[in-house]
């Protein structure tokens, strides 16, 4: 059910929610958090709401969407309430702010927050340089950005590294979960030798590739070389050097990876790029600080200088067509 409330106020939206609950019990109260989505793009608004709806099936929540309309229009709020089949296991409140109200997202959100429930803010498109200093970000225990959705992903990642505050995280990091799991599992197999160096290869502007390199540099305390490949799509490969040989996880097509290491048979591994829904579900599972993500940001300063482009791989990658910047 979708209920439109044009030219409304937050008080009227609240009253409508209470009315719906009393009239039909359509809005359940078993919410574990409030998810605030700040969408300045507008072009992919429905995709972001769909991702939140799917995530709500594992994490029942109230979803508040702040969509900024024209700043030159007269001041008004167009509201919308979605419940039932149009809201997953959540209740979705969409507030489109116009005119001077477009800059007052925090004031619009506060009256609609669930009492005594954690708050998570998500910027699915371009986000603030310092999420913890953003007015809406200041309300939240967790703040989720996506560097891959920025115009300059690497610059955005670098900026947020400098402004990092406990509670910040990025979907570029979440997309690496399967890569990190496979690498850790590979090192659990014999021979149990120290890693002496690593090479991480991926798309030139892939923030996920940067973060994986930073993670290895921080936790293994080894020199890590970051190879930038023009025309690739997200992560391509990771090579870990040991005395007996190289452990390599290679994914040329964005779907299936190949894990090879001395003394072990070569294995094919499902390593599909993770979609936004899966990444959001994972992030909502934890509301504490992500110390590993923080450490990986610090590891970016430890990468070996002089990363180079791989021209042969660049030519092969160019045949794959349009790049998928949001992929890991």
Image: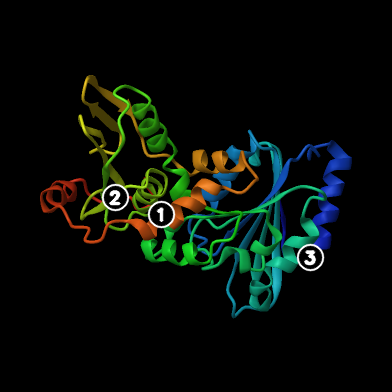
Mark 1–mark 3 distance (CA, rounded to whole Å): 46 Å
Residue 2 visible:
no
Residue 111 drawn above or below residue 196: below
Mark 2–mark 3 distance (CA, rounded to whole Å): 53 Å
Mark 2–mark 1 distance (CA, rounded to whole Å): 10 Å
Q: Is label 3 in a helix, a strand or a loop?
A: loop
112 on left or right of 166: right
Task: Report which quarter residue 307 is drawn in.
Answer: bottom left
Mark 2 closeness class: few <14, some 14–19, many ≥20 residues within 10 Å: many
Residue 54 drawn above or below residue 38: above
Taking depth in this image into account, of 6 and 233 the one nearest to the observer is: 233
Measured from the top left, where is residue 130 in percent x and y? 55, 67
Q: Is label 1 in a helix, a strand or a loop?
A: helix
Pick whichever of labels 2 and 1 is earlier in the sequence. 2
Point out the image quarter for the C terminus: top left
Query: Residue drawn at (47%, 62%), measured in percent from left and top?
Result: 161
The residue pinned by badge 1 equals 299
The residue pinned by badge 3 equals 9
Mark 3 closeness class: few <14, some 14–19, many ≥20 residues within 10 Å: some
Marker disc for residue 224:
2
Q: Are marks 1 and 3 in contact (CB under 8 Å)?
A: no
Q: Are marks 2 and 1 in contact (CB under 8 Å)?
A: yes
Pick whichever of labels 1 and 3 is earlier in the sequence. 3
**How many discs appear?**
3
Measured from the top left, where is residue 100 in percent x and y? 67, 78
Query: Residue drawn at (68%, 57%), measured in percent from left and top?
Result: 140
Point out the image quarter for the N terminus: top right
Query: Residue drawn at (78%, 37%), measured in percent from left and top?
Result: 30
**Residue farthest toward the right in the current orientation of the protein:** 22
214 on left or right of 309: right
318 on left or right of 118: left
């Amino acid at each position: 059910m979708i209920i439109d409330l044009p030219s409304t106020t937050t008080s009227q939206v609240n009253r409508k929610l209470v009315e719906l609950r009393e009239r039909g019990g359509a809005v359940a109260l078993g919410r574990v958090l409030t998810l605030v989505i700040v969408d300045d793009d507008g072009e992919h608004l429905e995709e972001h709401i769909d991702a939140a709806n799917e995530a709500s099936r594992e994490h029942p929540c109230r979803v508040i969407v702040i969509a900024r309309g024209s700043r030159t229009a007269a001041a008004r709020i167009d509201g919308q309430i979605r419940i039932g089949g149009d809201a997953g296991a959540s209740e979705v409140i969409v507030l489109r702010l116009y005119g001077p109200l477009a800059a007052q997202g925090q004031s619009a959100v506060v009256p609609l927050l669930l009492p005594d429930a954690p708050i998570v803010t998500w910027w699915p498109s371009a986000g603030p340089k310092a999420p913890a200093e953003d007015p809406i970000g200041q309300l939240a225990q967790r703040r989720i950005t996506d560097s891959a959705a920025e115009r300059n992903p690497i610059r955005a990642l670098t900026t947020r590294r400098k402004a990092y505050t406990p509670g910040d995280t990025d979907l570029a990091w979440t997309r690496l979960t399967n890569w990190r799991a496979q690498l850790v599992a590979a090192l659990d197999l014999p021979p149990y030798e120290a890693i002496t160096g690593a090479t991480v290869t991926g798309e030139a502007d892939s923030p996920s590739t940067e973060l994986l390199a930073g993670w290895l540099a921080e936790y293994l305390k080894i020199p890590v070389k970051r190879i930038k490949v023009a025309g690739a799509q997200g992560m391509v490969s990771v090579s870990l050097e040991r005395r007996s040989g190289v452990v390599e996880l290679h994914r040329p097509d964005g779907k299936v990876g190949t894990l090879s290491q001395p003394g072990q048979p070569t294995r094919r591994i499902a390593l599909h790029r993770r979609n936004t829904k899966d990444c959001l579900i994972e992030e909502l599972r934890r509301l504490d600080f992500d110390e590993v993500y923080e450490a990986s940001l610090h590891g970016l300063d430890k990468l070996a200088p002089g990363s180079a482009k791989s021209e042969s791989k660049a030519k092969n990658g160019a045949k794959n067509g349009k790049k998928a910047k949001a992929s890991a």
